Amino acid sequence: MVRKRQSELPHTTAQQLGSLIKSARDIMRKDKGLNGDLDRLPMLTWIMFLKFLDDAEQMRETEATLQGTRFRHAIEPPYRWRDWAAKEDGITGDELIAFINQDETIRPDGTRGPGLFAYLRALQGADGGDRRDVVATVFKGTVNRMQSGYLLRDVLNRINTIHFTSSEEIHTLGLLYESLLKEMRDAAGDSGEFYTPRSVVRFIVAATDPRLGETVLDPAAGTGGFLVEAFEHLKKQCKRAEDHVRLQKASLLGVEAKPMPYLLCQMNLLLHGLESPEIDPGNALRVPLREIGDRDRVDIIMTNPPFGGEEERGILGNFPDDKQTTETALLFLQLIMRKLRRPVREQKGGRCGMVVPNGTLFGDGVCARIKEELLKEFNLHTIVRLPNGVFAPYTSIPTNLLFFDRSGPTKETWYYEQPLPEGRKSYTKTQPLQFEEFAPCIAWWGNRVENERTWKVPAAEILTNGCNLDRKNPHAKEDITHMPPEQIAADILKKEQRIAEIMANIHRLLAKEAG
């Protein structure tokens, strides 16, 4: 009966959905409270989030009625979407803005009570783990920036025509939402650290190959790219109804402390079909490493942790005295090592695929001590060296992909140098790295032989050389057009110094002969 009701809904085509979202964004452009896509997308997201939630609640309510079971709404009247947003001629203007923004206001049903955001932020789950807690966390970090209640009413009316009960529309909207996230990354410039290129995400997921029944964690989830890709990867393995249940419950876990990426991550996962995303809104580094036990460990970690940032002093106390550092990437590496599942009998240990900056490869001191533990306690089997510009133009820092597992100590580490396309010197925002370019690496992954792109280094050699993982390709000819400018400058300076030494020697020899 429920399916019939859904199929009777008029479907919105991909083209209609695209123009609908564009229309809503065009309306937002007229509002003086919003400044660019960095404001518009979060605004659009919380509106869509409430419509999505209400559509899902109505479906669940119908199912509960058919089964004769009691249903409790996450959001009660008069705060449900259907109570205040669904009517085309519903509250508008200053009355609408007051209802959303104010701590206490006249509500759409004419009674006095908390405003919408005040109500949503105060929600509490019955057992500390249901949708009410998710809604409260989302809205604690969300602000309504639109100033015109009339423009906001127009946006609500547009979003109200999306049918979140249709799996086809949700799928289309999920793809559309990903393109909006990319646009937002482009608008963010230097602050776009929460977006990892889709090609890199897809490659890490393909190489790590999560299997149904395994738990996947991203401790720096951002907008949910790794979790969405892992969900799609696992969904293809579902053959029976119980497989889908297993996928929905406790397969995917994330952590994201920043309010805006947290909201975007929740929406991204919901639109891709994860019914109750388990995203922890706290700091992933807040728990002392020594307190992380077997029950906290997971099978797979895939992530692009923030690098270059610094954590507050209180966080550093959660790490061993000889491995405390302000470099965030190194703190996350230690957390990941601790969170991977230990091997037990027939069960293999956990595995990881992650992005790291070049500094992690050649760093000494604390960095070298962390890498020593990585090599001695884990199997660092592969390092993929990415070419220039993969994260351009947001950072010029060269990046690498580390793949390691908990199967035992490292015997040797394979290196794979991902080449630039023929004739290219770097990737750019308009010509980014494509997933298809990883095809040779994926083909090599299960059948490893040395070639012009690949080489291996014994772990013993790495350990005796200060744990320096920054190894150049021994088969490659030096091509300065692909080198970072600072490296070219350093090489020129070194050659100039060598020339000066030679000239000084010649000068001395000539002086001797003259004497």
Image (cartoon, helix red, strand yellow):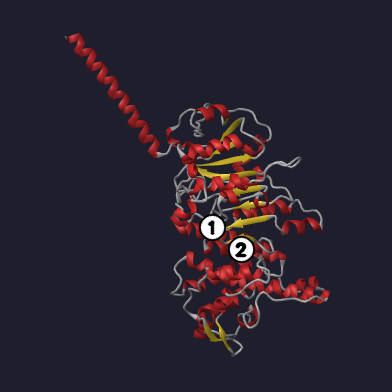
- Residue topped by disc 2: 266
Spatial separation of the CA atoms under disc 2 and disc 1: 16 Å
- Residue topped by disc 1: 283
Q: Nearer the viewer, residue 378 or 71?
A: 378
**Location of residue 379 in the rendering, given as x and y in whole percent from the top left corner:** 62, 36
Placement of 371 over or under 340, stated as above or below = above
Residue at the image position 52 percent from the left and 59 percent from the top: 183
Q: Is residue 384 left or right of residue 29?
A: right
**Mark 2 or 1, closer to the camera:** 1
Name which residue type carries label 1. Answer: Asn
Q: Are marks 2 and 1 in contact (CB under 8 Å)?
A: no
N-terminal label among 2 and 1:
2
Q: Is residue 419 visible?
A: no
Q: Quadrant of residue 153?
A: bottom right
Q: Nearer the viewer, residue 142 or 486?
A: 142
**Location of residue 512 in the rendering, given as x and y in whole percent from the top left corner:** 20, 11
**Location of residue 368 in the rendering, given as x and y in whole percent from the top left corner:** 49, 37
**Badge 2, how many Cα within 10 Å: few under 14, some, many 20+?**
many
Q: Is residue 272 visible?
A: yes
Residue at the image position 48 percent from the left and 49 percent from the top: 328
**Location of residue 69 in the rendering, given as x and y in whole percent from the top left corner:** 80, 75
Q: Residue furthest left?
A: 515
Q: Quadrant of residue 287?
A: bottom right
Q: Nearer the viewer, residue 447 or 22?
A: 447
Q: Nearer the viewer, residue 86 or 255?
A: 255
Placement of 196 over or under 115, stated as above or below = above
Q: Is residue 377 left or right of residue 55?
A: left
